[in-house]
Amino acid sequence: MAHKLEKYGPYLYILPALLIVFCVIVYPTLALLWGSVTSTDGSSVQFVGLQNFISAFEDPLFQTAILNNLKLFLMVPILTILSLIISTLLFNKIKGWKFYRAIVFFPYILSISVVGIVFSYILQYNGIINTVLRSIGMDWAALDWLGNPELAMGTVCAVVVWKQLGFGVVVLLARMLSIDVSLYESAELDGASEYRKLVNITIPQARSIIEFYVVITLIEMLSWVFSYVFVMTSGGPGGSTYILEYLIYKKAFGGGNYNIAQAISVVILLIAAVIIAVQQLLMHKGDDENE
């Protein structure tokens, strides 16, 4: 008996955690996959294969949502470059750098709903920004930021960048502060410019953190932008700001197309899996090169 407890005891200890993982992750994922290939009509469930995916891909709103998510992906290099530049300035401890660090990080801790509501008022056609622009004679720049289908998604992207920038700055700055100072001192003795120090020291030393930040931000642009769209534009004008998350919400709770919504959810799951797989491959490739 004691031998069996010694053999199976560790498994009993991790059993509660395994049950939680199964209930929270495994079972919902399996249910999602099954729902994406079935059609529910009342109490009956019928297997339809890839029909839900075909219906989703043929929907013009799905095509718009995919395009808008790609636009959000373009924000990732912008966020990464801005984070590198600002964190480098703060790392050099310009006057008042602690104050600037707090100012940059402050938007990140705000609620997305609060940010969305505030900017939806600020960016109205007769909002604060346009009022200021008109008062200084720049009527040509007073645009309908959220009411113009050609500008609305770009405006949402700009708000996302403003809010998310602080996270990248703080993460990269924390890594920079842990880099051996002697590397920078040696570079300064050799007459290296700030640009050369950034390219030859900071970026290589912070490579793993940069990769982590890029992957996390890509996933955020894929699955964490719903609140911005819901609060600021509700998918409008004319469906121009639909993203995959918002389309899932409208299909499931606005149209009752739960199986199509599940199929779109699987698409998001697959895209996220590909992003993580690519990141892992690049990380292992980098480790092999270092060896």
Image (cartoon, rainbow, N blue to C red):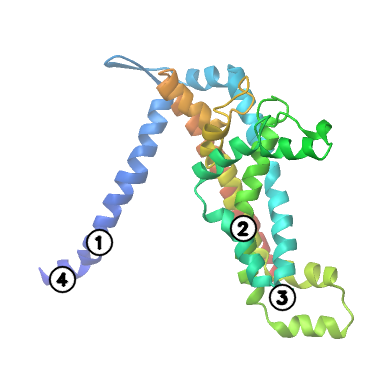
Q: Amino acid at mark 2?
A: Gly
- The label on residue 3 is 4
Q: Is residue 109 above or below residue 190?
A: above
Q: On the rendered structure, is 275 left or right of 227?
A: right
Q: On the rendered structure, is 262 left or right of 193?
A: left
1 or 2: mark nearer the eye: 2
Q: Amino acid at mark 1?
A: Tyr
How far separated are the C-alphas under marks 3 and 1? 51 Å
10 Å crowding of disc 2: few (<14), some (14-19), many (20+): many
Seen from the viewer's position, the closer of residues 6 and 231 is 231
Answer yes or no: is residue 216 visible. yes
Residue under label 1: 11
How far separated are the C-alphas under marks 4 and 2? 54 Å
Q: On the rendered structure, is 132 left or right of 232?
A: right
10 Å crowding of disc 1: few (<14), some (14-19), many (20+): few
How far separated are the C-alphas under marks 1 and 2? 42 Å
